[in-house]
Image (spheres, grey):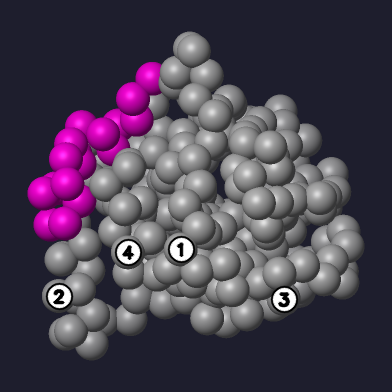
Amino acid sequence: MVNGEVCIETKRIVIGSATPVNLPRARSRIGIVTETHVPENSPPPTRWSEVSRDAAAAAAYRSRFAALEAQGADLHGEARFVASVVPPPARILDGGCGFGRLTRMLTQLGYDAVGVDADKHLIDIARREDPATEYVHADLTAMDLSQENLSPWGTSTWAGTRGFHAAVLIGNVVPYLAVGTLDAAVRRIAAHLVPGGLVIAGFGLTRADLPEKANIVPISEYDRALRGAGFSLQQRYATWDRGPWNIGSSYAVSVHRRT
């Protein structure tokens, strides 16, 4: 630590299976609709479900981003960050993908990107607007993206592979998890990654930097959950453009590696 800032190596991280297996690209599977198996003991509702309760709420949420884009707002900082850490081609799991803002950009950048979200209405929007990318309606704490639970045609990007090279959690996905489910979500994500795979997450740390319904998740609690699932911290910043992070930062962008 120098002058209160965490100094962590920022070079690209080499992860397992540097050359992805040659498989059908996600964008070639136009119109495939996939659902995961729903266990009898379904997971508790996320905090996000208290914000977006129906199709109208999902549409309003999408419209806010459309307005920002029309005003010239930069909505792709997260995608640039991901590309700088895990260059394409690679298999990326976008956890809590919403309407596919990041997932779609990752597909355009040459990744095999798959979006997962517990909000069916946002998944419906993502599938409608971006049929070239695979979107799965599932809760992060219970998802099973195995071949048998997804495409009966055996065409899923991850079918027969060793998993994703990275999972990305943006847009306060972590604070919107149901209370007490962080460990379960991290374990399920870990189960879908290759050895050396990454979890890249960004979220607010204070009430002033979080939406009303989101939980405050201390960065120490997040790190504890990742360590418990076999990850080690590689990089941490205060912004997606690599602003320096310190203990007083109100936002954290973290990169953990599966060991």
Lower position in the chain sequence, tag 2 or tag 1: 1
Crowd band around label 4 with a 10 angstrom C-alpha radius: few (<14), some (14–19), many (20+) = few
Task: Please state which of residues 10 and 125 is positioned toward the viewer in this rendering.
Answer: 125
Crowd band around label 1 with a 10 angstrom C-alpha radius: few (<14), some (14–19), many (20+) = some
Q: Which residue carries the number 3 mark?
A: 89
SS at badge 1: loop
Lower position in the chain sequence, tag 4 or tag 1: 1
Total number of numbered labels? 4
Residue visible at 15% across and 66% down? Answer: 63
Q: Are marks 4 and 1 in contact (CB under 8 Å)?
A: no
Was residue 46 drawn as part of the magenta stretch in this picture?
A: yes
Residue visible at 33% across and 25% down? Answer: 45
Give the image location of residue 103, x and y in percent: 48, 65
**Badge 2 amino acid:** Ala
**Badge 1 amino acid:** Gly
In the shown orientation, is residue 154 left or right of residue 175?
right
Q: Is residue 85 above or below residue 199?
A: below
Lower position in the chain sequence, tag 4 or tag 2: 2
In the displayed image of the protein, which residue is found farthest to the top? Answer: 41
Q: Which residue carries the number 1 mark?
A: 31
Cα–Cα gap, marks 2 and 1 = 27 Å
